[in-house]
Image (tube, rainbow, N blue to C red):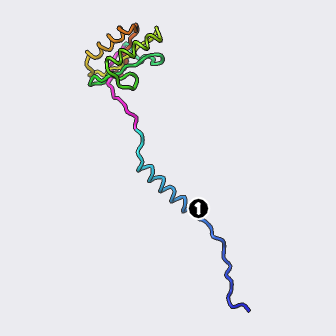
């Protein structure tokens, strides 16, 4: 005698579509709320020159950047004038054919540019280049 009837149950199943929807919402939330690493950038307005159509090749050269306010950067690292001269001397002692490229903003103090050039001459660097941009075509 059977008083209860056994129900035939299907095994539980996971609905994948709704899980994907939830995961997409979580992913969007994470992307919106996370902060991305911002690379510091120095905006320069390079002087225009018709004689130099392309900037000098920075490969094998030291690049000094002079910002509008007169701040000095060797590559991407901020440096003082005394530290710059010491690094230029160290680089010139390792490589006798070392070249220096100067990237200076058009509004940069001209005295800073001259001091960087003096530091290069004091370090024994013979070749000093300047980065320029070509004027827009009219």
Q: Is residue 102 magenta?
A: no
Q: Is residue 38 above or below residue 128?
A: below
Front residue of 49/42: it is: 42
Residue appearing at x 42%, y 42% in the figure: 36
Rendered location of residue 2, percent (x, y): 72, 90
Label 1: how many Cα within 10 Å (few below 14, some 14–19, many 20+): few
- Left/right placement of residue 38 relative to residue 81 reads right
Report whether residue 75 is seen: yes
Rendered location of residue 46, percent (x, y): 33, 22
Residue appearing at x 34%, y 16% in the figure: 49
Quarter occupied by the N terminus: bottom right
Q: Residue furthest bottom?
A: 1
Q: Is residue 48 magenta?
A: yes
Quarter occupied by the C terminus: top left
Span colored in magenta: 38-50
Quarter where residue 37 is shown:
top left
Quarter where residue 64 is shown:
top left
């Amino acid at each position: 005698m059977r008083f209860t009837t056994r129900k035939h149950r299907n095994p539980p199943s996971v609905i994948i579509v709704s899980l994907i929807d939830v995961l997409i919402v979580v992913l969007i939330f994470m992307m919106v709320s996370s902060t991305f690493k911002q690379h510091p950038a120095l905006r320069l307005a390079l002087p225009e020159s018709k004689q130099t159509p392309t900037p000098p090749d920075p490969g094998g050269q030291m690049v000094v950047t002079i910002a509008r306010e007169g701040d000095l950067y060797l590559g991407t690292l901020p440096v003082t004038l005394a530290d710059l001269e010491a690094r230029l001397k160290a680089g010139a002692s390792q490589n006798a054919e070392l070249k220096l490229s100067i990237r200076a903003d058009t509004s940069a103090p001209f005295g800073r540019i001259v001091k960087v050039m003096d530091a290069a001459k004091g370090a024994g660097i013979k070749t000093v280049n300047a980065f320029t941009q070509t004027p827009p075509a009219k």
